[in-house]
Every structure is written in C-alpha cells, then in structure tokens.
Image: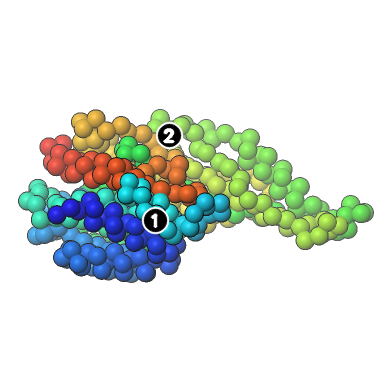
Amino acid sequence: MNYLDDSIDLLRQMVRVPSVSFEEGDVRDLISARLSEWKVPHTLLRGNIVAASEGFDPSRPTLSLDAHIDTVPPCAGYSFDPFNPGTDPEVVRGLGSNDDGGSVAAMIAVFRALRCEPLPFNLLLTLCCEEERSGPDGAAWLYSPDGPLASDSRWALPRWTIVGEPTGLRAATSERGLLVLDGEARGVSGHAARSEGVNALYIALDDIAALRAHRFERHSPLMGEVHLNVTQIQAGTAHNIIPDSCSFVVDVRPTEQYSGEELLSELQALCRSTLRPRRLGNRSSASSPQSPLVRTVEALGIPTFSSPTTSDWMVIGSDAIKLGPGESERSHRKDEFVTRDEIARAVKIYTDIIMNLYGNIVE
C-alpha cells in the first residue's frame, strides 16, 4: 500500500478546508473520515485525534508522534488562492501545507506503516488542535497529568515525543518559549495646541526604549540571549488631542534560564507602563542530556539545532525533539508550500528513528 500517496492526497484535501485555530472541526472530521477508510482505529477528543498502535500496553513505554491540524489566518499578498493546493504532483501549496500539514501527512504515513509492527514500545499518534493560539483544549489538555492520555486506561502519557513541525528535517533539541506582554501607559488628555495633559504615547516610547536597551544577565549555552521585540503600538483618537492611553505589545522569546514570572518582574521594573502577560506557561523546552531520541538522531547523522519558535513541545512534558518536513521560514507567510520529496524524506527519517530508538535507551 502506498501510504505516502494517500497522505499527500489527504494533505491536498486539508488545504481546501479552512482550519484556523478554534475552528478546526471540519479538518479534524476530514482526517477522521480518511483514517476510518484506512481502517485505522482512533478517537476524537474535543478538537484532537488520538490513535494507538495495535496491542497498546499502558505498562510499556510509549513514543508519540505529535503534529497540529490548525493554521493561522491567511496573510495578505498570496499570489494564488491560499485554499487551493494546486495540481503540481511534486508540490502541495496553500495555507497550512508547510505548517503543519507536511508533518501531519508524514506522521500518518509512518503510523499506518508501523502501527501493527512488533515494536518494543507503544506508538501513539496525536493530531492536535489550537497549537497556533496555545489553546486550552489542544495538547495542553491532551498531555496534561489530568488529561485523557493519563486518565484513560487505554493509553498512557508518552515517555518520548517527536513533535512534527517544519524544521528542514533537522532535529531541534531545544526551543525558545513565548511570553507576550500587553503594555499600557496611562496619561492625562488635553488639547495639543496648548500642550496640556500628560502624553501617554511619550511614556510608552520611553518604556519601549528601555525595553530595547535591556540585556538579560543569564546566557543560555543552548540558545544564547533572551530575545525581545515590541511588535504593536496604538494610541490617540485625533490629531489635536493628547492621548491619555497608549497600548503596545511585547514579544519575548525566553530561554531555559528564565521563567515567565522572572521575566515579567524584571521587565516591569523598567517601565512606568503596566505590563500584563497573556500567558506565563509558554516555557522554553530542551531535550534531556541523556535523551535516547538525541542519541538516535546523532547516530543517524541527522543535524541538530536550537529552534527560535515555540510548539506543542512546551506543554507535552516528555523527553522530545522537534523535527519535520518543510521550512520554518515559509510559515505564517504568503505562498506557503511543502514538497513531496520533503514529506517522503520525513517518512524515512521518522521510520529510522523509531526503528533505532530502542538501541539507544539506557534504563
């Protein structure tokens, strides 16, 4: 059976179905229907899909293959319909094809090929919703200590996870976290002609300058410095009114050296504006120094790197690497695409890792 062709055909269908975060129901149902056609038993859990290998034994260790089925909204500037996958047999284009449809397709193909094989550990396939928005019903719920993988006797929380994301088929052994801060400067309105009031925009600009100039003391041997960028600002209602409020957004990419609470405290001390975190739990992730996944990819000659982007890894909790077809640089941009060759190579790499993992496990 040609699992690769099946998966690429499914990916083309997925591109045609809008699946922005929190609206993934239709694409989840599409994937579920195809899995049923292929006689792959699976369970729908909220917006997620879970499939377990034949003879799954919760007392044995488990390796999960995890990818996400949601997308961001299409950005401006597409030179073609973002929901049209095209007809080129060597390329699948369109929204979600690269992030994260390529990984979904490759992982389904591998799972179908190996789910009945007598492996020394269980295989679990988890296709998750809400990844792009760090939603509460995706991997954060699925992999939580109180979630269904832990509480349902049919399954078990994985010991190892391969997180499918577009990495150029390199293995990320660490990734930065994400801390988004909403800043608000408060002033006093007045007439611009008389220079009355207290200009909240100027307060915000001073704070932004302080944030830009700040350097964090702790340096990560894996990821270097914490990255910080101010990405949005809004103030004023008319040209002749001194604004009494100015809001701005700060995008912080932490390393394993800092918690979200520590970063918030350090940055708030620099600012007159109030900084409010959207979420403090989007932590940085890193593979265990003794990780059999890392030993396996190194033995296979797969390049490793530290990823600047976040993924479901931050909520999964198990030893993990992040690896998949496509390129991160294509994500969240116009004219997204992934190639058949990239997906085919991902299928081989995932298979090689699974078949060689057991020899690198040290109890």
Q: Nearer the viewer, mark 2 or mark 1?
A: 1
> Is 22 situated left or right of 302 in this image?
right
Residue at 63%, 35% in the rendered image: 213
Type of the residue with mark 1? Pro
Which element type, helix, strand or loop, lies under badge 1? loop
- Find residue 69 and report its image quarter: bottom left
Q: Position of residue 343 (x, y in %)?
A: 29, 46
Front in this rendered view, residue 127 or 209? 127
Which label number is shown at residue 223? Answer: 2
Residue at 39%, 54% in the rendered image: 86
- The image shows residue 225, relative to residue 24, as above or below, that is above
Q: Position of residue 81 (x, y in %)?
A: 48, 58
Type of the residue with mark 2? Met
Q: Position of residue 124 (x, y in %)?
A: 20, 56
Front in this rendered view, residue 215 or 112? 112
State which quarter of the image contains the C terminus. top left
Q: Is residue 331 visible?
A: yes
Q: How is this picture coloured?
A: rainbow
Which label number is shown at residue 256? Answer: none
Residue at 88%, 54% in the rendered image: 192
- Residue furthest to the left in view is 118
- Find residue 35 and report its image quarter: bottom left
Q: Is residue 155 visible?
A: no
For the residues labelled 2 and 1, the Cα–Cα distance comes to: 36 Å
Residue at 57%, 34% in the rendered image: 215
Which element type, helix, strand or loop, lies under badge 2? loop
Mark closer to the chain start, 2 or 1 = 1
Label 2: how many Cα within 10 Å (few below 14, some 14–19, many 20+): many
- Label 1 belongs to which residue? 85
